[in-house]
Image (cartoon, rainbow, N blue to C red):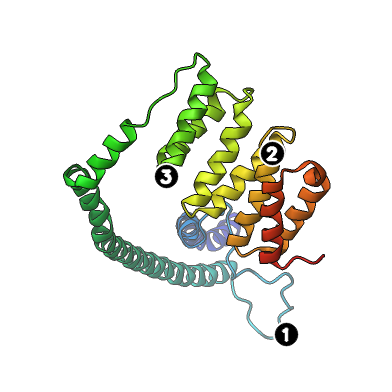
Amino acid sequence: MRSIVLFVLAMTAVPATPLLAQTSNVEQRVGKLEKEMKAVQRKVFPGGGGQYFEPEIAPPTAAPAPAPGTPASSPIVDLTSRVDALEAQLASLTGQAEQNAFKLRQLEDAFNKYKADNEARLSAAAAPAMAAPAMAAAAAPAKAASTPATEARKIAVAAIERPSSGDAGEDAYLYGYRLWAAKFYPEAQVQLKSVIEKYPNHRRASYAQNLLGRAYLDEGKPALASVAFYENYQKRPKGERAPDSLAYLGQALIQLKKPADACKVYDEFEDVYGANASSSLRDVVTKGRTSAKCAG
């Protein structure tokens, strides 16, 4: 009886060693595949935050019962088949990652080449445009110094007498007026601006702002003139030259081809200053209304 038991035990123990060896081998392959699959997925799906995506090949949730008489496959055979499928999928993902990396390098190289070519074209196009003003600026001082008209103008401006009455605001304005009367309009503009800035509360500030507009208008700059006239009327409506600024603002607008706005300005003049305006200003307004074809 004892010999029979030992024989049975020996017969059942024979397959144990190969079975354990196959299981250990499969487990090692599965562990290696999981590590490689995670590494490949980090390349193919960047930004996944280390998340592991399960393989598409998975065991069925409920295996159908084998038909009677059909031999059942062992768990080791099934697991080996799944590992083979995983290895094939891993090889496919590895190839895809390498292709993506190659295409990305090609795109980066193409973009860098385009960027370098574009910068070179822009630099070549900008060089002549930048060189021309630089050459003009370099030549300007020599040309100005060699122009007799420039020296003659400086001498003429220096010959304009500066008043010295003891009233700094009065003297500054009168000097600007003399420059304007001598038709040195740019020099007069600079002087009159300084009067407005230094002596904003002086009675001559209204004169200076109005005359600044006249200097612009006489130089053929009606846009700047209109700004100067409007600011004088707006900031100093009771100033001694506010009516003048409103009347000449209409002239500036006519030169700017805005007759409708000029007519509105002349209507404003009639409402605010009409009754008390001087005859010379009323004459300016009357001629302006005719030129602008104002109604009434």
Q: Position of residue 81 (x, y in %)?
A: 52, 72
The residue closer to the viewer here, 83 or 49, is: 49
Q: Is residue 177 visible?
A: yes
Q: Secondary structure at mark 3?
A: loop
Residue designated by label 2 = 242
Which picture quadrant has residue 48?
bottom right
Q: Secondary structure at mark 2?
A: helix
The residue closer to the viewer here, 139 or 258, is: 258
Residue at the image point whose x is 46% and y is 72% from the top: 88
Alpha-carbon distance for marks 3 and 2? 23 Å
Amino acid type, mark 3:
Lys
**Image marks 3 and 1: residues in contact by CB distance under 8 Å:** no
Side (left or right) of 132 relative to 274:
left
Side (left or right) of 245 relative to 36:
right
Q: Secondary structure at mark 1?
A: loop
Residue at the image point whose x is 62% and y is 56% from the top: 251
Q: Is label 3 or label 1 in front?
A: 3
| Residue 153, above or below 13 | above
Residue designated by label 1 = 68
Residue designated by label 3 = 183
Classify mark 3: residues with Cα within 10 Å, few (<14), some (14-19) or many (20+). Answer: some
